[in-house]
Amino acid sequence: MKFRRQSRADQGINLTPLIDVVFLLLIFFMVSTTFTRETHLVVNLPEADATPGESLPDTIDILITADGEYSLNNVALVNKQLKTLMAGLKQISRGRTDVPLTITADAETKHQAVVTAMDAAGRVGFVNLSIITQEPEEGQ
């Protein structure tokens, strides 16, 4: 028998094992990934408008100062407690929870004071709640 050397053409790198490893990694990450469902709170934020809105004669206004003091229809409350605010809302509304309620807060007011006012309004039963915004002055 006569053996001859045959010339081999350069066949390159075999990519089959590399592709197998990539698919195995892909399957591993797909199986080990956990999906969490996060709940999101939908909040409708007010928008400032250049035109002044109509003021209804039958509204309740909660004004919150920078220190967190409350006043209902320009009458200051004696303290900052939730129970006091709820009692004031019940007294001023005389049981009518369909009256529009507006909350106006100072820019320096802590967020907790606004949330407390919203909580008091919700506990009393108000459903028509709006927050007053103010368009920034020119130069600010």
Image (spheres, rainbow, N blue to C red):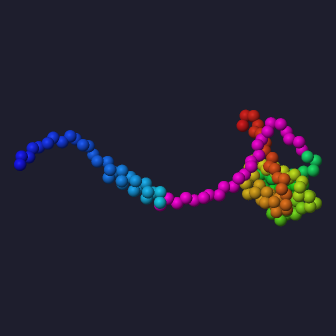
Would residue 85 be seen by someone viewing this image from the given angle?
no
Out of 25 and 103, give the one closest to the viewer. Answer: 25
Out of 89 and 11, give the one closest to the viewer. Answer: 11
Q: What residue is rendered at 24% in x and 43% in y?
A: 11
Tally the numbered discs. 0
Q: Is residue 38 magenta?
A: yes
Residue 85 at x, y = what percent?
84, 61
Q: What residue is rendered at 89% in x and 54% in y?
A: 99
Residue pushed farthest top? 139
Residue 107 at x, y = what percent?
75, 47
Would residue 96 be seen by someone viewing this image from the given angle?
yes
- By secondary structure, the bulk of the magenta-drawn segment is best described as loop
Q: Is residue 52 magenta?
A: yes
Write down the region rendered in magenta. 32-55
Q: Is residue 1 above or below residue 120?
A: above
Residue pushed farthest left? 1
Residue 109 at x, y = what percent?
75, 52
Residue 96 at x, y = what percent?
91, 58
Out of 23 and 43, give the one closest to the viewer. Answer: 23
Relative to residue 14, is residue 73 drawn left or right?
right
Q: What residue is rendered at 5% in x and 49% in y?
A: 1
Residue pushed farthest bottom? 83
Q: Quadrant of the C terminus?
A: top right
Quadrant of the rendered structure where residue 35 is?
Answer: bottom right
Q: What residue is rendered at 6% in x and 46% in y?
A: 2
